[in-house]
Amino acid sequence: MQPDLSGMGILAPTHAPAACEPTAEEKHQILLDRLQQVRQELARRDIAAAVMFDPAHVRYATGSRNMQIYSSRNPARYAFVPAQGPVVLFEFSGCDHLAKHLPTVDEIRPGKAISYYFNERRTEEVTREWAEEIDDLVRQCGGGERIAIESATAEAAFALKRCGYEVLDAQEPLEQARAYKVRNEIKMIRSSLRAVEDGVRKLERAIEPGVTENYAWSMLHQHIIETDADFVETRLMNSGPRTNPWFQESSDRVIQRGELVALDTDVVGRYGYYADFSRTFLCGDGEATSGQKELYQMSYDQICTNMNLLRPGMTFREYAERAWVIPEGYWSRRYFALAHGVGMNGEYPYIVHGPDFETSGYDGVIAPGMTLCVESYIGHEDGGEGVKLEEQLYINEDGAVELLSDYPFEPRLLQ
């Protein structure tokens, strides 16, 4: 069962090939536009350059992909992106050939691995040499007093400060750059979603009485690798009593007939773009219980209500204040956010529930170019099963809201 969008003012998802797969020329321009978006955010903050270690940020700014998970925990591959001047990609040893085709990269150098794991007692020395090389690059680009880094070691920041720089966190300019999609970037996101949806279909077919959660979950992993995705960022699939509370990871538990099975895709998919939607299934070919239907209907109502609220120009606070009210008994196990941005990962903004706003929220404006995930989790504080649903949407250049994710809801669970 697909969601009824007729009364919501939300555009239906598209599967048109031209809208879900960029051309070679468009891919080339997307890379250049993303880099320019980063440069603009750096210049706006008077930051001379950013040094990026986070593989998602490196890929966003340069288009290069290499050992994404490994690179997320080993500071041995990074990119130097100045507000103006040549971009230098520091690649892992022996990998310089991987990015030679990219229009965003002016030079490729071997990276200096700045961690104890690689250097032991030479770590401070190697990090000093790393900072001196970065300092030299900044001077070649015209100089500056402010430099931004992220996902590096603490010693890297100390070394740059000793070179005379004011060191800032690069996350702010990068999050702001990524939050507003450049022209045709949405095609890459749709492509990622279409592939992941096919993977979830394989997963859903594998959900039968007697299989383990891990077995069913592996169907998605196999498919996304076949379709040139990167990896699944979490292990959020669970069944029966493990569906409440949420955030219980896939396990070797055997799924039973008549149980709910809930998942959150969290796939870093094609072109590095996140495909992020959630569904809850019913195992077996029987009928759902009244309790299961009640849970599912509440979650469905929450999703539909909060999707329908999305408007360009609306503030995060306004959105939180108007959101669907979670019934008593379900509040304590609510999902932590009403909605969040999404691009290559979960990203800015992060919109919390109204009652949480003063303690953990921040304000901002929903704007064209943003891609958002609307979240729901319904599980009673006294236990029993729970339901997880989530949809991914896009505020397009005209201000219209488009539903991006296109996976059916379970008709046996809707009242």
Image (spheres, rainbow, N blue to C red):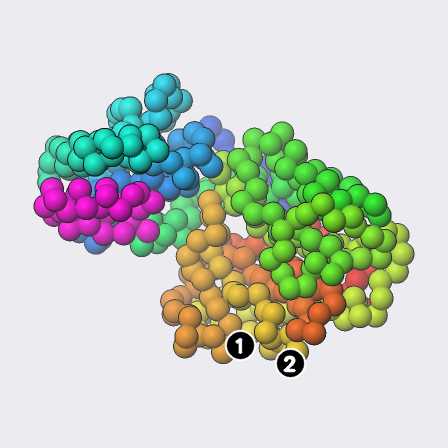
Q: Is residue 409 left or right of residue 120?
A: right
- Name the one closer to the observer, 198 or 22: 198
Q: Which mark is residue 373?
A: none
Magenta residues?
145-171
Kind of residue at badge 1: Arg
* 154 in the magenta segment: yes
Instruction: Tell me the residue that label 1 is attached to.
Output: 322
Q: Is residue 211 left or right of residue 34?
A: right
Residue at 83 percent of width and 52 percent of height: 256
The x and y percentages for residue 333 are 61, 70
Secondary structure at numbered mark 2: loop
Instruction: Tell me the residue that label 2 is attached to.
Output: 328
Residue at 74 percent of width and 67 percent of height: 384
Given contact means CB atoms under 8 Å apart, are the residues at marks 2 and 1 in contact? no
* 101 in the magenta segment: no
Residue at 46 percent of width and 42 percent of height: 184
Kind of residue at badge 2: Glu
Q: CA distance from mark 2 to mark 1?
A: 17 Å
Residue at 40 percent of width and 66 percent of height: 365
Secondary structure at numbered mark 1: helix
